[in-house]
Image (cartoon, grey):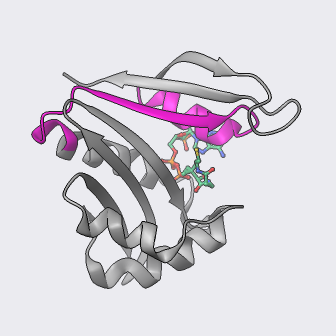
């Protein structure tokens, strides 16, 4: 089930971040996605657990995806794509017309996901994450 994340999901999302991300977000940052009215987190609930989530912040008509992750046992089932689509729907209802995100050039899975979901690369920051590790900047117009 894809739904807006709630405060009681914070522990699950903290655990998910620790599992999936080399530099996991701290609890306060995750909690703010839920409590701040200029941020949003969408969660995928499977078997009573949070199998994946996406978090974004927005100002006026622009949003930025801060993080997206899906627990390894639940990957390649379309969960991340469904999260992005629900996020897009929610952001559009908030008046957002463009979504930005940043991804490391070595993260081929995430890049394939974003490109399939209609994001297009518009810039690159060479060696941003270290030698040979560029930051790729993507955007999607959703107006
Ligand atoms: C990237 C990530 C969120 C994808 O989650 P997911 O639920 O497995 O993705 P989906 O099943 O929705 O994938 C949708 C499509 O994206 C592409 N895709 C997703 N993961 C891929 C991978 N590892 N390799 C190649 N293509 C991939 C495919 O086209 C896929 O469709 P298909 O399975 O029919 O081929 C997940 O691998 C993850 O959490 N990775 C670690 C965290 C991370 O890197 N986050 C991004 C930070 S910028």
Q: Nearer the viewer, residue 36 or 89?
A: 36
Location of the N terminus (image quadrant): bottom left
Range drawn in magenta? 91-118
- Say whether residue 35 is left or right of residue 53: left
Q: Is residue 92 magenta?
A: yes
Q: Is residue 1 visible?
A: no
Q: Is residue 141 magenta?
A: no
Q: Is residue 16 above or below residue 2?
A: below
Q: Position of residue 43 (x, y in %)?
A: 34, 65
Q: Position of residue 27 (x, y in %)?
A: 48, 76
Q: Nearer the viewer, residue 136 or 58?
A: 58
Q: Position of residue 59 (x, y in %)?
A: 25, 38
- Say whether residue 70 is left or right of residue 109: left
Q: Is residue 113 above or below residue 115?
A: below
Q: Determine the residue positioned at 39% across, 55% down.
A: 55
Q: Determine the residue positioned at 20% across, 33% down.
A: 96
Q: Determine the residue positioned at 55% across, 79% down.
A: 15
């Amino acid at each position: 089930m894809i739904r807006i994340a709630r405060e009681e999901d914070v522990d699950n999302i903290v655990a998910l971040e620790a599992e999936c991300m080399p530099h996991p977000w701290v609890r306060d940052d995750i909690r703010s996605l839920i409590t701040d009215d200029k941020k949003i987190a969408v969660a995928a609930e499977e078997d009573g657990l949070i199998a994946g989530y996406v978090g974004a912040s927005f100002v006026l008509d622009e949003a930025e995806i801060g993080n997206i992750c899906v627990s390894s046992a639940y990957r390649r089932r379309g969960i991340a794509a469904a999260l992005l689509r629900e996020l897009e729907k929610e952001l559009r209802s908030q008046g957002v017309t463009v979504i930005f995100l940043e991804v490391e050039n070595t993260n081929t899975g995430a890049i394939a996901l974003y490109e399939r979901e209609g994001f297009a690369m518009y810039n690159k920051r060479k060696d941003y994450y270290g030698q040979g590790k560029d930051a790729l900047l993507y955007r999607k117009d959703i107006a």
